[in-house]
Image (cartoon, rainbow, N blue to C red):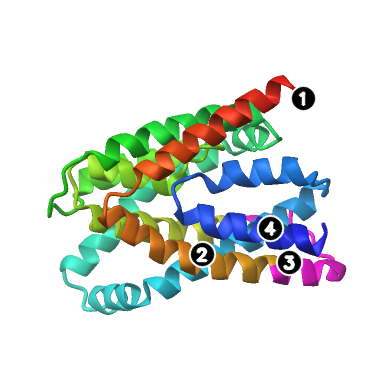
Amino acid sequence: MEIIDAIILGIIQGLTEFLPVSSSGHLELGKAILGDHSVPEESLLFTVVLHFATALSTMVVFRKDIISLIIGALKFKWNEDLQFMAKIAVSMIPAVAIGLFFEKQLEQLFSGNILLVGSMLIITGILLFLADKARNTNKEVSFMNAFVIGISQAIAMLPGISRSGATISTSVLLGNDKTKAARFSFLMVVPLIFGKIAKDVLSGELTYNSGNFTTLSIGFIAAFVAGLFACTWMISLVRRSKLTYFAVYCAIVGLIAIIYTFFN
């Protein structure tokens, strides 16, 4: 993989992990356009590095929240912080179950299936449009809400379904406060990303070649910086009900991807 490709894919991952346009779908489109011919092991390692970068950017943006949650949980009282962490744990159940029992089936979908990506992007656009029209409230995410949002996160494992778009939209459509919905959406994915990274590392499927260090490092930096920007921007966009623009974007890119498959 060329350095310029690593930069482009890193920026795509950093932006689309938080902006509601599907990071997995855009990475598949980006690889198809750039003609990425990396062997599966190299491609997997690069993907893991990019996800690690965006997880770190989330932790930087929400560092005060994370520190507060940890301090509150260490009091060992059923307080608001411990309840919030418990809700995150509940939200992880569907995605963990899908990841454990259907991992191979999911991996088969990430093989340049542009038609699937395009179709799922259109569905993401519809979800965003509906969420943007929802009335804002002061409602907190409940335990039942957390589980339903977790189901959305599991469905977002499909390439083209935006994880942030699906989870934030679901949360808002359930009547939750938009800012709180975005905060919950971004924090709920951090333990999942680190869990997936740990699983990939322990599986022994990752192979590292010292010759790829520069490419991996540049991709990491690009994804981290883009992630910092996108995460902060997305919180503001959700609060100001500006998701319709992304709904239109997803619909357009989805249609282009579908048309692309019929001419190639």
Q: Is residue 221 left or right of residue 247?
A: right
Question: Residue 223, labelled with which disc?
Answer: none
> What distance separates the C-alpha of mark 4 from that of mark 2?
13 Å
Q: Are marks 4 and 1 in contact (CB under 8 Å)?
A: no
| The furthest residue to the left | 138
Q: Is residue 157 left or right of residue 188?
A: right
Query: Which residue position is annotated with label 2?
Result: 227
Q: Is residue 201 left or right of residue 215?
A: left
Q: Earlier in the sequence, mark 4 or mark 1?
A: 4
The secondary structure type at the circle numbered 4 is: helix
Q: Quadrant of the N terminus?
A: bottom right
> What distance separates the C-alpha of mark 1 from that of mark 3?
30 Å
Q: Position of residue 192 (x, y in %)?
A: 47, 55
Q: Which residue type does callout 1 highlight?
A: Asn
Query: Which residue position is annotated with label 1?
Result: 264
> What distance separates the C-alpha of mark 4 from that of mark 1?
23 Å
Query: Which residue position is annotated with label 3?
Result: 216
Q: Nearer the viewer, mark 3 or mark 2?
A: 2
How many residues crowd around disc 2 within 10 Å: few (fewer than 14), some, or many (20 or more)? many
Q: Nearer the viewer, mark 4 or mark 3?
A: 4
Q: Which residue type does callout 2 highlight?
A: Gly
Q: Main secondary structure of the magenta part?
A: helix
Residue 94 appears in the rendering: no
Q: Which residue type does callout 3 highlight?
A: Leu
Residue 23 appears in the rendering: yes
Q: Nearer the viewer, mark 2 or mark 1?
A: 1
Q: Quadrant of the C terminus?
A: top right
How many residues crowd around disc 1 within 10 Å: few (fewer than 14), some, or many (20 or more)? few
